[in-house]
Amino acid sequence: MLTERYCYSKILQIINFMLQLLSRIFVSFFLLISCSLFSKAQFKGDTSILLANNKIEITSISFTRTIKKEANIIYPKSLLAHVNESKEYVQKFSEKQRNYLLRTHQMGKNYFPKVAAVFNRFHLPQELKVLIALESGFNSNAVSSAGAVGYWQFMDAAAKEYGLKIIDPKDTSAVRLKKKDDRKNFTKSTYAAAKYLHDRCKNLNNDILLMVASYNCGIGNVWQAMKKSGKSNPDFWDIRKYLPLETRLYVMNFISLNVVFNNYEAFVNNKMIFATEFSYVPLFENVSKLNASSTD
């Protein structure tokens, strides 16, 4: 009889142990599933996460949001309306074209102030001064495959329209008579570029990106792209897909140069932060830290 009771007691102990073990396994499994669901929700944008007042709530678990790194990029005033559309491109450009940007900024110290002074007389946005870098890399003898010449890469027809004397490369007497092409003269060509851009201000509603696009592909192509957009007052982003690829990249590079040069110290020191980074800490961890500090 005692033996039977002893065996029965042992069996109950074993059953109780197994139930406790199963209970622990179940709790561990539940926690694992919960963490997995939270991870998916956090990184896949699940709508079960509610963001409000810097707090994330997932069922009964709360998280506080703190700033890890704060965005520090300042766009020039005339480009503030284009931050969202250009920020990703500018970031990649600043990383991949670092040597080019450093070299251009250094060379620009001799040219940008002079260009800015001329453009200021025509009430042009100062950001347009970087076009000389995009056009010729500050090279007076630059000649494009299409035949554009000089600092500002004027084609023959446009040069004549804006009062520049041009030299036909086939004219053998030009060398003998020491004739000079005005497109290679910094002051004369810069004034001509200012006049061209001033005219574009008037017929492109002072839209700086459309002005830049027209300098690359011509006002006719920009007007045609504006018409294709079907909008009464389209901007660059509305007509971008109707412009040549070269022009699209030209405008984006224009934005990039201005943003980097406007944040040059941060760029040089590799401290450009384009988007604020956050860290999320479970609320109970914060409470634990506070309790620990209060007991010290």
Image: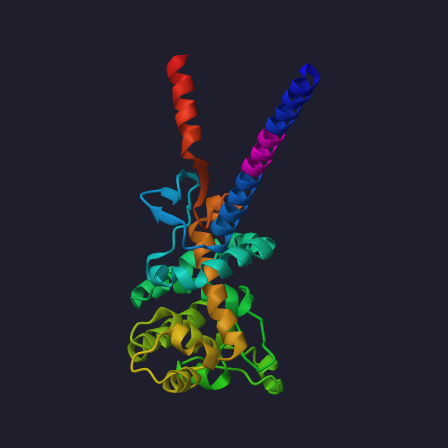
Relative depth, front residue between 42 and 213: 42
Q: Main secondary structure of the magenta part?
A: helix
Residue 275: give x, y in percent of width and height: 44, 50
Q: Residue furthest top?
A: 296
Vertically, is 73 above or below 158? above
Image quadrant in which the C terminus is located:
top left
**Residue at image x 42%, y 64%?**
85
Residue 2 visible in the current orientation: yes
Vertically, is 59 above or below 290? below
Quarter of image, res 287: top left
Image quadrant in which the N terminus is located:
top right
Query: Is 19 covered by the magenta stretch?
Result: yes
Give the magenta range.
18-28
Quarter of image, res 123: bottom left
Relative depth, front residue between 236 and 136: 236
Q: Residue furthest right?
A: 3
**Residue at image x 41%, y 55%?**
47
Vertically, is 285 above or below 35? above
Vertically, is 269 above or below 241? above
Decide if residue 103 is on the left or right side of residue 205: right
**Residue at image x 59%, y 76%?**
143
Residue 175: give x, y in percent of width and height: 60, 80
Decide if residue 115 is on the left or right side of residue 25: left
